[in-house]
Amino acid sequence: MVITASSGVGTGAALALPPHVQLKVEDLQTYFIQGASTVKSVDGVSFSLSRGQTLAVVGESGSGKSVTSLTIMRLLAHPGRIVGGRVLYRLRGGDVVDLAQLPEKRMRAIRGREIAMIFQEPMTSLNPLFTVGDQIMEMILLHESVSRDEARVRAKRMLELVEIPAPERRLDQYPHEMSGGMRQRVMIALALSCNPSLLIADEPTTALDVTIQAQILDLLRRLQKEIGMSILFITHNLGVVAEIAHEVVVMYAGRVVEQGLVLNVFERPRHPYTRGLLACIPDVRRDRTEGGGRRLLNAIPGNVPSALDLPTGCAFAPRCPLVVDRCRELPPLIPVSEDHLSRCWRYDDL
Amino acid sequence: MAVTSSPAIAGRPGLVSLVFQRKSLLIGLVVLGAITVFAVLAPLIAPYAPNRLSVVNRLQPPSGRWWFGTDEFGRDIFSRTIYAGQLSLLVGAAATLLAAAIGITLGLVAGFFRKADGIVARIIDAMMAFPDILLAISLVAALGPSLATVIVALGIVYAPRLARIVRASTLIIRELPYIEAARALGVPTWRIMLRHVLRNLVSPILVQATFIFAYAMLAEASLSFLGVGVSPEVPTWGTMIAAGRQYVGSADWMTLFPGIAIVLAVLSLQLVGDGLRDLLDPRLRKDL
């Protein structure tokens, strides 16, 4: 992972990316401005995603992880605005564009074709009034000039790709005739039907039960290997991160608090928030051996601060067990080791 | 449902059998169909020309010779009733189509574009605040009475009803995850509006349209009754009832039969509307 510690971005005429990089977000700032109040949902987020790799963005509700993905797709709802930063993306042809600046018309050609997205709710992300085949064919016909027959053949092949049995019959079924896991497979087939280079998965397994969740993660991993796409995986579940991601960005109150290779971050988290999140994952063995009858789950005390009223300095300070006076001053992202950044003054004490 | 195939895939019943399973829809379609056939084939079915005068046979009660009786000029009520169906159905259908065209466009635009919503919603509210008939009368008065005027006036009067329903539903559907998903997959806005949103509104629109069809026929009858609709010589159910009003005590068949025609037409439209709503929803269809 190429880590840019802070904003300092040159403004060269031609945009460029290192050859292995698919997406590079630089100091992205997305604010929701309504009258006099401003919510800084995404405040100076930077990361880069290599081709064929998976980057997970982790955080609680309101941390800005979903807004980050919607910003990249330029699907922000009304008061949301990109205030600063760049979203450099490598098109299929090799050209690099800044998605934050692209006109809506060009953006539309990129959505679905270059960048596809799957959502949390497989139950409601498909239109109930059209058959699954219709919806996949619509995608293909929209972005490519092929005949209806050819689109249908492709749609069937997509269902095979996501391991849906009897694809020919499934094509003519409506979403309500399928289970949640099946619908998420259809969503994935829909998203991948035009061979996107980047798949944004916004909590795609959250609404599914654990066995189906594992199947979907397996499927995504296999498809990534076969197709070679990059995946930006939005989740609040660190267990899922460990399974699928190569790199992880931990967000808190709109800012990145820690980022690095999954191995490094899980091995030795360098931010108290990440450490707290990891401690929140229940472990049956540990919980049983440690002190007999303990039943309580770990939790980080307190709540995410209101986005309208962030504390000055480190936003995590009010909940932090390691808080010191210096935390009233916002720490930068500090390189703590190779490919590992932490926004904590006391990273060395962790 | 497991990953293996499921029994839900088993064949779906065809459209015809679905219609036959819904008694009220079937009855509605049969009655409406019969009215339409009578109206369209009136020149073949009618025993007399609708305007053939026969003063000697004026105000005859229903009999083997004049099935529905005759009016004050000796014209055959049966012939006039089925001829009148032509105009009444035409006015109803044309006004409904016009109302749909205006109402759906306004509703979609208002529901989709925040900026347009304020203006369009106010106009809709203002129009709804007017009594239907009063608005229609003033429009007809402004445009001058004729068949086309009546159609245009009724189309404008009933457009806000559809616009309001389309707007409200669009506001809901616009926020559904599959609309966001469609956007994320690069579907252009106009296509989302027409294919994804409008397609979802087909059943409320159809149901409302059948009601508007019925209201428009009634309103045309009212306008004709009040003398601001089509000219009195042209037989419509409204003009016939208006003409029979003076003779309600002595020759009630003059108002009775066109009245029954209106009731049957309106009732059958309502049955069809309700039946179609159920039929068009794939989730309800499954439960049959």
Image (cartoon, coloured by chain):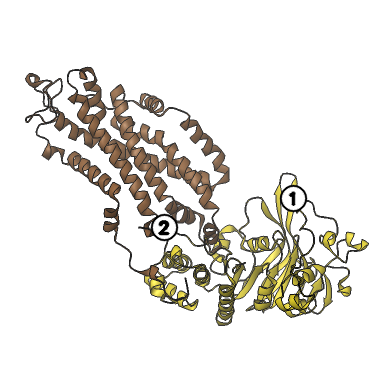
Chain colours: A yellow, B brown
Q: Is residue A167 left or right of residue A11?
A: left
At x 72% / y 75%, what residue is drawn?
Answer: A283
Query: Residue flagged by tag 1: what amino acid is it?
Result: Thr
Q: Is residue A204 left or right of residue A167?
A: right
User: Relative to residue A243, is residue A131 drawn left or right?
Assistant: left
Question: Up-down: is B212 above or below B194?
Answer: above
Residue B107 locus on image (x, y percent): 47, 43
Q: Are marks 2 and 1 in contact (CB under 8 Å)?
A: no
Determine which quarter of the picture holds residue B155: top left
The answer to whether residue A84 is above or below residue A137 is above
Q: Residues within 10 Å of mark 2 (few under 14, many from 20)?
A: some
Q: Which residue is mark 2?
A: B283
Q: Amino acid at mark 2?
A: Arg
Whether residue B123 is visible, yes or no, is yes
Q: Looking at this view, name the residue that lies furthest to the front.
A: A293
- Position of residue B276 measured from the top left corner of the image (x, y, whole percent): 34, 49
Q: CA distance from mark 2 to mark 1?
A: 43 Å
Q: Chain of mark 2?
A: B
Asked which secondary structure carries label 2, the reply is helix
Circle 1 is placed at which residue position?
A38
Residue at the image position 23 percent from the left and 43 percent from the top: B31
